[in-house]
C-alpha cells in the first residue's frame, strides 16, 4: 500500500489526506516530526517539508503541490465529473489560484503561526525553535483569519463551490487549513455565515471524518471541532 | 498579444519570462509595483503577487505556479522533446520538487530578503514596509545562498540538467532566482564550480539575453552580471 508521511496538525498533510479520501485511495499514514530533521526523512524530502507520498513501486512524491498535481495526473481521468482539478482551462486556473491562496497565503498568515506557536513549539527542542509561544504572532493570526473568512464567504456566495460548480482542490485546501485553526478554537465563525455554511458542507463529507476523529496528544480540540452542527 | 504583468527584479516574473522565451511566445511586458496595491492590479490577482499572464481572449492566469502549469498544458505538447515539464512521471515529480525548492525555499531564504531590503524598500512608502534596509536580513540571505549553491552543484554533478537529461522548469526557476541575486552582486560563485558552470550554460541561452540587458533605475548591476564569461 502507498504511504503518506504526515503530521496530524499539518494543514498541507490534511489537504492531501482529504484528496486521497475523496479519490478513494487507501494509504498507510506515517507520522513525522519534520523539525527533528531525521536523515531518513530528509532523504524522502530534502526540503524537510510534509507531506510526502511514497508509491508502492518506490516513487517518492514530496511536497503538497507536487502530490496534488501527481494525483490528478495519475487518477483524475478515472474520476469523471468528480475530478478535483477540472479539465476546463479557466476552472483549472481558478482552482490552482485558490488552492495556492490557502496553501501559501492563508498558511503564512494564519495556520502556520497558530500551529507553530500553540502546539509545535511545545514539542520542539529549543535549538529547533521550541519554547514559549509568541503571543504577537498568535494575535496577528487571529486578526488575519477574519479577512480570509470574509473572502471565503464572498467566493461561496458567488459559486456553488469555491472554484466553480463542483468540489475541487480549492475547497479541500481551504477546508484543510481551516480545520487546524478550528481544532485550536480560533475560527470566528460568526464573522461570515456563508463561509460557515460552506465549511459545514465540507465537514459533513465522509472524506472529512477521519480528520475529525483524530486527537493530538496534550491538546484537546475545541468543543465544536468534531460537531457537524457547530 | 498576451501580456505579462511583471517587475524586472521579481524572480518569479523572471522565471515565467525565461519560460516564455524558451517556448517562443511573445508577450507585452507590463511593469507593476505590487506594493502599491492598485485596485486595477488586485483585480487581476487578489493575492497581489506577480507575475500575472493575461491571454488574448481575456483569460487571466495569476501566480507563478498556475502560469507554469497552464503554459505546459497549453503549449507543452507542441514542444516535443524540448518540453520543459517532461511527460515521464518521475522526472515530472522531480522537476516540480526542484522548481518549488527555488520558487519557495530559495526565495524565502535568499532572494526575497535581498531584493526587498536592497531595492524595493527604497521605492516603497513607509506604511507599505519601505525604509532603511534590515542588515540582519541581508546577512542571513548571504549565508543561506551558500548552501543553495552547494545543493545546485550537487545536482549538477549528478545530472546533465537539474531535474534530469533535459532543460526543465527546475533549471529556469533556479536560474531566475539566482539572476536577481547576481544582479546585486551577492552570489559567491567561488563556493561551487559546478554550480557556476551550470549557470554559465543557462546564462548563454538566447532566452536569457533580454534579462541581462535590463537595468533597474538607481541600481547598477554587478560588474559580471551580463558577462557570459564571469
Image (cartoon, coloured by chain):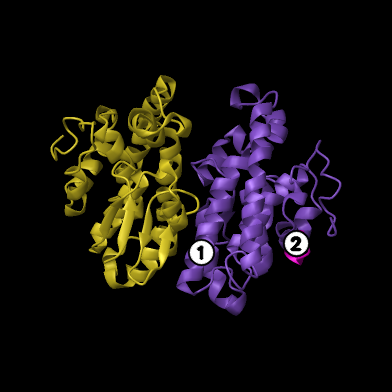
Chain colours: A purple, B yellow
Q: Residue at x 69, y 64 (%)?
A: A21
In front here: A158 or B67? A158
In front here: A104 or A165? A165
Q: Is residue B49 left or right of residue A86?
A: left
Task: Name the image quarter holding residue A153.
Answer: bottom right
Q: Can you identify the residue that label 2 sits on? A: A197
Mainly helix, strand or loop, the magenta region?
helix
Q: Residue at x 75, y 57 (%)?
A: A193
Whether the residues at callouts 1 and 2 have beta carbons within 8 Å, the answer is: no
Residue A96 at what x, y percent from top left?
Answer: 51, 60
Which corner quadrant holds the C terminus of chain B?
top left
Local SS, label 1: helix
Q: Is residue B90 left or right of residue B212?
A: right
Q: Which residues are magenta?
A: A201-208
Q: Is residue B190 shown to the viewer in this render?
A: yes
Distance from disc 1 to disc 2, alpha carbons, whole Å, reads 21 Å
The chain to which mark 1 is attached is: A
Residue A129 at what x, y percent from top left?
Answer: 61, 26
Per the rendering, the mark at residue A94 is 1
The stretch drawn in magenta includes residue A124: no
In front here: B12 or A60? B12
Q: Residue furthest bottom?
A: A80
Residue B217 at what x, y percent from top left?
Answer: 23, 35
In the rendered image of this protein, does residue B14 appear above or below residue A98? Answer: above
Q: Is residue A5 shown to the viewer in this render?
A: no
Task: Name the image quarter holding residue B144.
Answer: top left
In the rendered image of this protein, does residue A53 appear above or below residue A32? Answer: below
In front here: B89 or A111? A111
In the rendered image of this protein, does residue A146 appear above or below residue B84? Answer: above
Which corner quadrant holds the N terminus of chain B?
bottom left
In the rendered image of this protein, does residue A162 appear above or below residue B110? Answer: below
Amino acid at each position: 500500500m502507498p504511504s503518506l508521511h504526515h503530521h496530524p496538525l499539518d494543514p498541507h498533510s490534511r489537504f492531501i489526506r482529504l484528496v486521497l479520501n475523496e479519490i478513494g485511495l487507501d494509504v498507510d499514514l506515517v507520522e513525522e516530526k519534520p523539525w527533528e530533521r531525521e536523515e531518513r526523512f530528509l532523504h524522502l524530502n530534502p526540503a524537510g517539508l510534509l507531506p510526502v507520498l511514497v508509491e508502492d513501486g518506490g516513487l517518492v512524491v514530496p511536497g503538497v503541490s507536487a502530490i496534488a498535481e501527481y494525483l490528478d495526473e495519475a487518477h483524475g481521468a478515472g474520476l469523471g465529473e468528480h475530478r478535483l482539478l477540472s479539465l476546463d482551462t479557466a476552472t483549472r486556473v481558478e482552482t490552482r489560484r485558490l488552492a495556492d491562496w490557502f496553501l501559501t497565503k492563508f498558511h503564512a498568515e494564519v495556520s502556520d503561526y497558530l500551529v507553530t506557536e500553540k502546539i509545535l513549539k511545545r514539542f520542539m527542542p529549543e535549538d529547533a525553535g521550541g519554547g514559549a509561544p509568541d503571543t504577537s504572532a498568535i494575535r496577528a493570526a487571529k486578526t488575519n483569519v477574519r479577512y480570509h473568512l470574509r473572502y471565503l464567504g464572498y467566493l461561496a456566495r458567488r459559486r456553488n463551490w469555491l472554484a466553480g460548480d463542483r468540489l475541487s482542490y480549492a475547497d479541500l485546501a481551504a477546508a484543510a487549513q481551516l480545520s487546524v485553526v478550528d481544532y485550536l478554537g480560533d475560527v470566528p465563525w460568526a464573522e461570515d455565515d456563508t463561509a460557515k455554511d460552506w465549511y459545514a458542507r465540507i465537514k459533513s463529507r465522509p472524506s472529512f471524518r477521519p480528520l475529525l476523529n483524530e486527537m493530538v496528544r496534550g491538546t484537546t480540540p475545541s468543543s465544536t471541532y468534531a460537531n457537524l452542527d457547530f
